[in-house]
Amino acid sequence: MRVVINEKLAARMRQIAQYLMFVTFGVPLVGLFFLNSQPADIFFAVVLPFVVLLIALIITVISVRLANLWVRVPRPEAVIPESLKGIGKNSVMYSYWHFPARHVLIVPQGVFALHVMYHDGKFSVHNDRWSRKQVGIARFLSLLRFDSVGEPTTEAKTAAEHVKKLLQPIAGEIDVQPLIVFIDPKVEVEVGETSVPIVSADGGQDNGGIKEYLYDLGKGKYKTLTPAQIEAFEAATVS
């Protein structure tokens, strides 16, 4: 299986996340130094500290969110291909080229837009409604990491629709399937009725692994790209 990663973008985003983390610590210190060097009045005593804290909070949220997406391990571009060894010699995964589809998988079983979930803990999904089971320290740590679940089902469908549009000039008959993939081995997911399949990368959960899901799906249910079409898609969208 071939993996094509937008290495330049990934490296740049990792750097930005790391720089912002340093800025997060620096802003309060600079603000404190500046405040101590100014005369005491209402602006410097009340307004400016509030502004400094607000700026620090905003930078913290951005830096942590970027770290979750670009720094946090395990990395999907490593875990998913490792889980799919032997899936097919013409298989390929594109990472960070086709936003909002962060990962596009082309295998003999079809073309998939992968919505990766890096979260750990316990989840339940029923009728496309997601809930997270957290108590005590786990809830507190989740708040610190700013790793809210969002709307994975909707986001996965949006990603698939975007890739479908990109394929229109090359292979308009191809349907792109959304697929939600958990990559943290500690996650537990209770899956009920859902319009988008949910799997884990390593196959350690009751909902099954991504390789098992694809093998069960079989060849022929969904059309996939030929080697020539893969080459044309890559030439048009990966640069």
Image: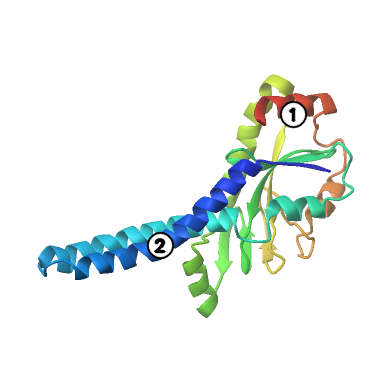
Q: Is residue 60 visible?
A: no
Q: Is residue 37 above or below residue 179?
A: below
Among all residues in the image, which is located at the extreme top? 169
Of the pair 1 and 196, the residue shown nearer to us: 1
Q: Is residue 42 above or below residue 86?
A: below
Assess disc 1: are there few (<14), some (14-19) or many (≥20) residues with their C-alpha within 10 Å of its C-alpha: some
The quarter holding residue 110 reads top right
How far across and down, in percent of the image, does residue 166 sit?
Answer: 64, 27
How far across and down, in percent of the image, does residue 18 sit?
Answer: 51, 57
Of the pair 115 and 131, the residue shown nearer to us: 115
Q: Is residue 159 visible?
A: yes
The quarter holding residue 1 reads top right
Residue annotated with mark 1:
174
193 lies left or right of 229: left
Residue annotated with mark 2:
24
Q: Amino acid at mark 2?
A: Thr
Which image quarter holds the C terminus? top right
52 lies left or right of 234: left
Q: Residue at x 40, y 57 (%)?
A: 59
Q: Is residue 30 above or below residue 4?
A: below
